[in-house]
Image (spheres, grey):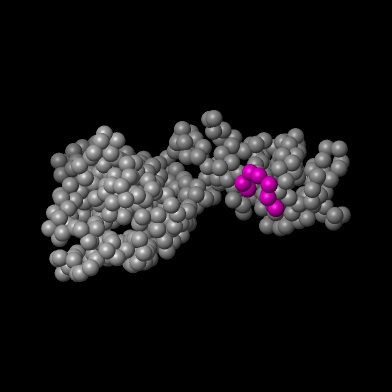
Amino acid sequence: MAIKINQNDTICAVSTSFGVAAISVIRLSGSEALQICKKIFESNNKSFDFDAVKSHSLHLVKIINTDNSVLDEALISVFKNPHSYTGEDIVEISCHGSIYIQEQLMQLLIKNGARTAQPGEFTLRAFLNGKMDLAQAEAVADLISSKSETSHKLALQQMKGGVSKQIKQLRNQLIEISSLLELELDFSEEDIEFANRDKLSGLLLNIKKEVLVLLESYSLGNVLKTGIPVAIIGKPNVGKSTLLNILLNEDRAIVSEIPGTTRDIIEDSIIINGICFRFIDTAGLREAQDEIESVGIEKTYQKIELASIILYMFDVSETGIDEIKETIKDFREKINDKDKKLIIIGNKIDNLIETPKGFKDLLEFNTIFISAKRRENINLIVEKLVESVSSSYLNTNDAVITNSRHYEALNHSQESIESGIRGLEDNISNDLLAENLRAALYYLGEITGDISNEEVLENIFSNFCIGK
């Protein structure tokens, strides 16, 4: 459904989850919000006057049906413009959570002049009324969907304007540069230089560096938001599925003595120390015995490519040090990603009769020795996983990009800035140079909503829940 950018209507929606609950909250926003409430609410306080009600006040009222019967008793919270979430008059109605009461109250609001809000329309109005920019509005949706302490902190930081502040600073620098170039274009016949080319080049190089830092933050920000992918790999029957079940504390994977039992990818998530980890149990790496297992092994390599952390497991009672070294070497050559973390796990220490060959070399690899069967030393794996996440970010207030739309816009902006830097080196005309800077400004403006169109807004706010 196409989004309606019509702020003349007064909108209403159930903001709490659908279903029976102790309390349900219904929101009303718009210029007629208080007048609509005046028609359907009645206060026990005879001196109560909706026309004179104060902002940020709470009142006990009765909800009156069209036949003058009482539908429910409710608390209403009044927030007058412009000091409200949307920048309009808002009334939040806390009624009892009966589905019947919710439906009847919604009908009463609509009969008296309101209409049902579209997904994200309350936040859209907050954006249109200047209560937040577009990046902050998107962070509201991220905050609602956050599943871990880390993703919650990221969303909260962006909702408070962490990313927006840095983008606006970059835009202000570009606007200053662009204005000097535009001034030169106005006085082109008089051959006056307002912007020194060396200084201009230095400013653009600094802006480029700042944009690159934001772009590089996306790889970390995205996995912290969605969950850090951890692939468990190794030969068949080394205990990968057993480890997955222990880490998840449930039987998600089939455990069997028969090699090749896991033929498909099994995924699930847990929260450890406020960080979401997405564990992936993969098919055992060996020569496939049939076509189905071959597909499973192929998927394993695909997941290794996508994972941020690899848990390489081997049977410490059967695997020689030369094989382990060769596997690690092969892994390093195939992946070739310095940011990917590798954690080496020697399983089945319960089967050991004597110290394994090459024990000193295994210690140099920082191998974690466990018995998945007896659940021994599993805590060491958990500690290493948390340690592998960039603790430097978790304690910083630096802006981090988590949104793919922002990443794409930054990429386009970066390309335009680089074109401008090359243009200065090639001594291109001012009008072409100004065009590059206008493009960079446009893409940065897309992030905060300084530049926006109805199609972009529809795409963003249609993913919100109704009532927010």
179 and 37: which is toward the camera: 37
Q: Is residue 17 magenta?
A: yes
Q: Is residue 190 visible?
A: no
Q: Which residues are magenta?
A: 16-24
Q: Residue at x 52, y 45 (%)?
A: 127
Q: Where residue 268 appears, x then y in whole percent?
A: 41, 50
Which quarter of the figure has residue 114?
top right
Quadrant of the rendering where the C terminus is positioned: top right
Q: Is residue 144 visible?
A: yes
Q: Where residue 258 appears, x then y in whole percent?
A: 30, 47
Q: Position of residue 168 (x, y in %)?
A: 39, 51
Q: Is residue 141 left or right of residue 115?
A: left
Of the pair 64 and 315, the residue shown nearer to us: 315
Q: Is residue 445 left or right of residue 183?
A: right
In the rendered structure, does residue 295 fall within the stretch colored magenta? no
Q: How many marks?
A: 0
Residue plotted at (44% across, 38% down) = 452
Q: Quadrant of residue 387?
A: bottom left
Q: Residue furthest top?
A: 1
Q: Looking at the rendering, in which quadrant would you find the N terminus?
A: top right
**Which of the 4 quarters of the picture holds residue 277?**
bottom left
Q: Position of residue 397 (x, y in %)?
A: 39, 62
Picture residue at 59% right of the left edge, 41% below the top: 466
Q: Residue at x 75, y 43 (%)?
A: 101
